[in-house]
Amino acid sequence: MTEHAVVIAGGGPTGLMLAGELALAGIDVVIVERRASQDVDGSRAGGLHARTIEVLDQRGIAERFLSAGQVAQVQGFAGIPLDISDFPTRHNYGLALWQSRFEPILAGWVGELGVPILRGCEVVGCAQDDTGVDVELSGDTSLRAEYLVGCDGGRSLIRRAAGIDFPGLDPSTSWMIAEVEMDEAPELGMRREGGGIGPVNRLEGRGPFRVVLTERHVEHTGDPGMDELREALVAVYGTDYGLRSANWISRFTDMARQAASYRQGRVLLAGDAAHVHPPQGGQGLNTGVQDAVNLGWKLAQVVDKTSPGSLLDTYHAERHPVGARVLHNTMAAVALGSPDDRHQALRDTMTELLSMDEPRRRIAAMLSGLDIHYDLGEGHPLLGRRMPDLDVHTADGPTRVFALLHDARPVLLNLGEPGGFDISPWAHRVRLVDARHDGAWELPVLGEITAPPAVVIRPDGHVAWAGDLTDPELPHVLAAWFGAATPA
Ligand SMILES: Cc1cc2nc3c(=O)[nH]c(=O)nc-3n(C[C@H](O)[C@H](O)[C@H](O)COP(=O)(O)OP(=O)(O)OC[C@H]3O[C@@H](n4cnc5c(N)ncnc54)[C@H](O)[C@@H]3O)c2cc1C
């Protein structure tokens, strides 16, 4: 039986990102992926939000995605546009980039890092014991791992095999979605009664078109076909616009469920395996990628015995509330989209509210992921929040904070006088960088904050501590997050 430190079930966006994070930390990881190639069937995510672009920037790979997509103000709540161009981030926009383009680019990076992907191979069962997990594969083979991560999507076999509950809401509405060719020019845009048509290539503006249609029934037994699609088009638009062919047709619902626990011993869940919700707001892929970035460095430290297994509990503690909030806001967006006069009145009211700066900033910061705040206790406003990508001057010349995170290692960034803290007990894990920053510190929603003299930045870009290097808490913080001090 082949052994690996970590086996990831599923090589979608979440599994790929996690594999990259583990590989950066030098962990022996393998992905088992059912699909024979990285091709994505049907429609999935349409783009990236600001925090996901930042996270990719933290690894030095954002440009690969930015150059393949279209930067735009894509943020919206229940169809109400939210401009984030005034947000204090280098990426004060979203990126229109279909998942079918996103995945191959991410897989390219993971390939460069040397992660093996067993394609056309399925995890069919798993069983954990005190020292590891047996992972049963299709084709009567198996793997042994210290940890297994289920990144295997909403119908996660790993979640079920681990006996993790998936409570939440059953679907109340079903939508058909398709990519089609039409002989006539269709009406573009959204329709209140449940229709929407847009060009697949948003720049060119012509066919093929992407069509979304509310269905009359929630329950379905199989995938929809051309007849059903035509019928649904006529029901909403009174015409099928000369529907000629469909590249694919599929459906989605407003089901909203979340794993009761993201960890069961040596089995963890991330991405859609941990949370499913309607696509309103376009947050699924983004949340999965960010789950992976939260989990990756922690799992790496547990595997290489830098940290105890309990560090993995912080993954659930931090990411479960983020997932719950996504479920919550998508539920609200679905309700606001109900095609009746009362909900229209509510939407008009929300539109008015969101035209004001403060509400717009709050909701847009939530949807973009820029306001994520892990509860690390009381303290400086940066504590638990994302570190802003400041321009800094170091002994090696000018750089920016995200560039210091490319290798996914923690950084103690000292912005005061050099010296004053002995990093040697952590020197092989935590990089001490003496730097200077001359501008203001600004956070989304909160605005300008007091500049701290020093910060501890975790590999996921979140601040674990902010204060003065003489703070007696600092050694404890380093030990809690990055392992006990070792003699120099
Ligand atoms: C219509 C629609 C629109 C969407 N729009 C957006 C959007 O605009 N923005 C956004 O962020 N998100 C959007 N999403 C959600 C997004 O597609 C998902 O959240 C995202 O794909 C989740 O990534 P994942 O890697 O967690 O899971 P998946 O993408 O589901 O990947 C799971 C992988 O696991 C593999 N797998 C499954 N079972 C096994 C097994 N037993 N063994 C081995 N491999 C297995 C699968 O083949 C797959 O590759 C949308 C989804 C839909 C359906």
Image (cartoon, grey):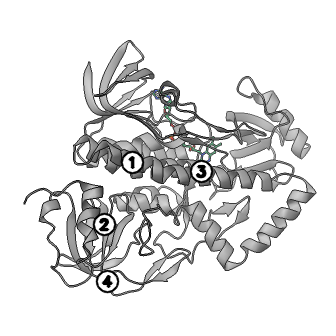
Q: How many marks?
A: 4
385 is higher (above) or lower (below) than 390: above
Q: Compare marks 1 and 3 and give the one earlier in the sequence.
A: 1
Q: What is the distance, in whole Å, between disc 2 and disc 4 at their CAs?
A: 15 Å
Circle 4 Cα neighbour tier, 10 Å, few/some/many (<14 / 14–19 / ≥20): some
Tell us which disc is closer to us: 1 or 2. 1
Which of the four quarters of the rendered structure image does ligand 1 lie in? top right
Asked which secondary structure carries label 2, the reply is helix
Q: Is residue 234 left or right of residue 280?
A: right
24 is higher (above) or lower (below) than 272: below
Give whichever of 409, 184 is nearer the camera.
409
Q: Is residue 47 visible?
A: yes
Q: Residue at x 81, y 48 (%)?
A: 195
Q: Residue at x 66, y 68 (%)?
A: 82
Q: Quadrant of the C terminus?
A: bottom left
Q: Compare marks 2 and 3 and give the one earlier in the sequence.
A: 3
Residue 156 percent location from the top left of the image: 53, 31
Q: Compare marks 3 and 4 and give the one earlier in the sequence.
A: 3
Q: What is the distance, in whole Å, between disc 1 and disc 2 at their CAs?
A: 20 Å
Tell us which disc is closer to us: 3 or 4. 3
Mark 1 residue type = Leu
Q: Which residue is mark 4?
A: 437
Residue 465 percent location from the top left of the image: 34, 69
Q: What is the distance, in whole Å, between disc 1 and disc 3 at their CAs?
A: 17 Å
Q: Which residue is mark 2?
A: 403
Mark 3 residue type = Ala
To which quarter of the image does residue 79 belong? bottom right
Q: Which residue is mark 1?
A: 295
Give whichever of 423, 387 is nearer the camera.
423
Residue 344 percent location from the top left of the image: 87, 60
